[in-house]
């Protein structure tokens, strides 16, 4: 990838900016590639929030996609942004995505609850999507 994305102010977004922890990269994936994919995911997420603010989330809600995108970002950033998802909606779609093998629950050692995280299949799906979305049109 290696190209700069435009943010809402027209400035460039450095795909490697803020990508501190890229540990656990799949075999054959470089840190630059992982940083580019993360930057694209964050850009898509930010665009979705702008759209929600301007047009209302009721018209364009895609909770499963918001959950996948948020988890992809959150596993690198340490916190998954979940947009306007209510707890009930997030849990309902987490269950659906678990059934599809895209998400699993990770129990924290000292926490009473559990957190959602992407499975290997979920990561692969998101990376493939982001690579295709970030490529120039044919």
Image (cartoon, helix red, strand yellow):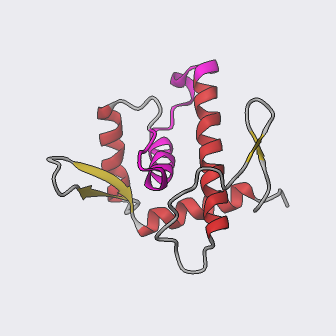
As drawn, which residue projects farthest toward the bottom? 27
Q: Is residue 73 magenta?
A: yes
Q: Quadrant of the C terminus?
A: bottom right
Which residue: 41% across, 32% down? Answer: 85
Q: Position of residue 13 (x, y in %)?
A: 73, 45
Figure check: 47 above or below 105? above
Compare residues 60 and 53 and report the one nearer the observer: 53
Which residue: 31% across, 41% down? Answer: 92
Which residue: 66% across, 66% down? Answer: 33
Q: Position of residue 80 (x, y in %)?
A: 43, 44
Question: Horizontal placement of 127 versus 95: left or right?
Answer: right
The quadrant in which residue 135 appears is bottom right
Give the tally of numbered discs.
0
Question: Horizontal placement of 104 versus 63: left or right?
Answer: left
Question: Horizontal placement of 11 versus 127: left or right?
Answer: right
Q: Position of residue 82 (x, y in %)?
A: 44, 37
Compare residues 61 and 136 and report the one nearer the observer: 136
Q: Position of residue 75 (x, y in %)?
A: 44, 55
As drawn, which residue projects farthest toward the right? 138
Which residue: 69% across, 53% down? Answer: 15
- Please name the predominant secondary structure of the magenta segment in the image: helix
Q: Which residues are magenta?
A: 53-81
Q: Quadrant of the N terminus?
A: bottom right
């Amino acid at each position: 990838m290696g190209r700069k994305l435009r943010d809402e102010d027209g400035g460039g977004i450095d795909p490697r900016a803020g990508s501190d922890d890229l540990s656990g990269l799949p075999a054959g994936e470089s840190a630059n590639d992982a940083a580019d994919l993360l930057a694209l995911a964050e850009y898509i997420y930010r665009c979705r929030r702008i759209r929600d603010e301007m047009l209302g989330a009721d018209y364009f809600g895609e909770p499963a996609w918001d959950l996948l995108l948020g988890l992809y970002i959150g596993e690198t950033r340490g916190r998954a942004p979940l947009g306007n998802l209510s707890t009930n909606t997030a849990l309902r779609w987490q269950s659906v995505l678990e059934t599809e093998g895209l998400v699993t629950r990770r129990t924290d050692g000292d926490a009473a609850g559990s957190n959602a995280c992407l499975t290997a299949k979920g990561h692969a799906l998101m990376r493939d999507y982001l690579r295709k979305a970030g490529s120039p049109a044919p």
